[in-house]
Amino acid sequence: MHSSRSAEVGSDALSAIPVLPSNQTARRNALYSAHQQTLDVFWNPDGTFIKREQEGYASVESCGGFRGSLWHCLAYLAGDQRCVERANRIIEAQWKQTYCAFAPGAAIDVLYHYRDRLEPQVIAMLERYLMLTAPQTVTDDLKIHGYNDNHPFKATHVMIAGGEMLDQPHLVQQGLKRLRDAVEVYERNGFPCEYNSPNYTPVSLQPLASIVEMTKNEEARDLALRIERFFWQDLALHFDSRTGICTGPLSRCSTNDLDGIMGGSVCLLMHLWPERFGLDLINEVYTNGDRSEFFNRENKLGLAFYQAHPIWYARAEYHVTPELESAIFDKPAGALIRGTIESGVSARKWKDGDKKPAGAPDRHVLGPRHSLLTTYYGRSFSLGTSQYSWLDGSQSHGIYCTIAKNGVTNEKRHPADAAVYFARQFVDDACPYLEDGNTGLYFREGGEMRAVQHENAALVFYNPFPYKAELKDIRTGVFRPLFFNRPQEVYVDEIPVPSLNYANMEFGRIAINEGNVYVGIIPMMGPSLMDARRVRLQIQDYGQHLSILLSSCEGWGVNEFSYAELLEVRAGFAFEVHEADEFASFADFRKWLASAVVEDDYYAQMRTTTYRREGLKLSSCYSPFHSAFRHVSVNGAALAVPALSIKGLPDPGAGLALPQEAP
């Protein structure tokens, strides 16, 4: 069996690249050993999938289809003869000839690491699959365009490693060009286009690290290593080491990730550094499985598919530096991370049968954008925002706050020790945290969000997407999961809300006591589109979430609105997060919050906002008809937009950003 190299053995260029953290082989073996116990749970002796519809396993798609089957086999092929024989049967039974973005790379992983454990006909099947699918990876849509980054890197892995495996040098050259193009985009920015995704950051890291390990081409190896470490830096600078979860802002995450539990990035970190966490990955994924509080809460495709992901992540050998490891786990108070990303165009046409708003164009277009990401770390909290969300924001979160409920003394990080806050705008009942709300894998954004931030204060602006002419409600929500802990107190102005249920016709300032941290929310809402109900502020506890709902439009029945009327609905809030010991008491914090001044005006199709409180004047202006801000200023000075700025902690040195000053 082919075995991966150990760290720094030999004198050639490949073995000079350290495999860090150490002991990756032992950790992989432990994970694979646990997964080998699933052999008879999911697979018949002939390699067909065991259907158990009452448990949600209706077909092999419950484990991810062909790609998921191959990921399972990565663990089985590392096992005893019975596991190896079953893996061969699984590949035969599940083999397909159709292209999938993930499956060609999985086939390469199986062939590269376990060729001597595969039967000749299975080798022929996998090589045939690569011959059919590898040429499909050279298409222009699989370049770094400001959309998802993970597909291009999976394709590049196929072109380079697969091209070498199939003796097709033209594929290797195409893969080299893809890597050069990616570096050119990232040299203009601080972070990947698909930045800080709890789901897809590992999906980019795995093929990049695999290129470093597999290729004979020195340039490809060097470029892939640079980009791999660039992605590790993105993860490191957006990981809150006090809570053990990723902080904001986030791109491409599911409802599951919003609750601050074990997304893909956290699973990868727990696999590589198990001693740093108070929660055991193998125990949660295998021993607890569907019963785990922290893994796979939105179990839509079945546990078999989710268990396959850590197996695939773990097959790569990663190349983290000591500086990157320090950046992941050591976040001094006051650390401030700022950097840019590029986002492509998101355009939506009205579907046949839709009620198109009067005055609407043929399609509603967002972007392209060059967005500034900001993340600030207090002693026991973090706050992150993006000026513009990735694409249309449907899977992204432009504001995300994490709070370490046990402060900074807990060295073993655990999701239950954290509280998180995020925001969404939604139309009608498209929210999973209402009494009759819609549930699903994604809590999709219903409006265009913009945000500006200075350290621990942010202004969050919303304008609804003009996709529905007829609607009943437009609400902006700030949400806080209640699965593991609850706030100590919630106030609206000086009115306590002990039951977390409240409604009023007027907006108030919301103050939340998290014990060691205080959170303040000041609504910034324009006139209501209609006042049939006139319930402007609601606080409620449904779906194990605290929901703070700010209404721009709420009626008893459906009303019709034009394209311009919808775009010009202005909503949002100011968000403050502070250490509790900065104030004499929670009452003192509420008094301080009440003294803040907000001016939020709309004139000449521009929204101009100024937020003033002690020590800060934060101002901005934008038009809902265009993507860009006219201006953003902090204390009277124009906000700088650095490609990458790291303050308050050592620079990990893995950025690709060029100097700010162009020639």
Image (spheres, rainbow, N blue to C red):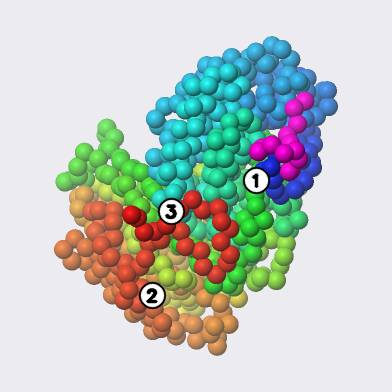
> Does 69 sit left or right of 377 as displayed?
right
Label 3 to label 2: alpha-carbon separation: 45 Å
Label 1 to label 3: alpha-carbon separation: 23 Å
Of pointers 1 and 3, the one earlier in the residue sequence: 1
Kind of residue at disc 2: Gly
Q: CB atoms at circles 1 and 3 under 8 Å apart?
A: no
User: Which residue in the rendered view is the most extreme toward the top?
Assistant: 121
**Mark carried by residue 319:** 1
Of pointers 2 and 1, the one earlier in the residue sequence: 1
Query: Residue 483: within the magenta?
Result: no
Q: CB atoms at circles 2 and 1 under 8 Å apart?
A: no
Against 22, residue 176 (above or below) is above
Residue at 42% across, 70% down: 454
> Does 462 sit left or right of 80 as displayed?
left
Q: Mark 2 — residue?
A: 508
Front label number (2 vs 1): 1
Kind of residue at disc 3: Leu
Q: What is the span of residues highlighted in magenta in the rendered image?
A: 1-14
| Position of residue 492 measured from the top left corner of the image (x, y, whole percent) | 44, 76
Front label number (1 vs 3): 3
Against 661, residue 11 (above or below) is above
**Mark carried by residue 658:** 3
How crowded pointer 2 is (Cα within 10 Å; few <14, some 14-19, many 20+) is rated as some
Locate the C terminus by quadrant: bottom left
Whether residue 31 appears in this view of the structure is: no
Which one is in front, 29 or 346? 29
How crowded pointer 1 is (Cα within 10 Å; few <14, some 14-19, many 20+) is rated as many
| Position of residue 298 measured from the top left corner of the image (x, y, whole percent) | 58, 45
**Mark carried by residue 102:** none
How crowded pointer 3 is (Cα within 10 Å; few <14, some 14-19, many 20+) is rated as some
Which one is in front, 536 or 662? 662
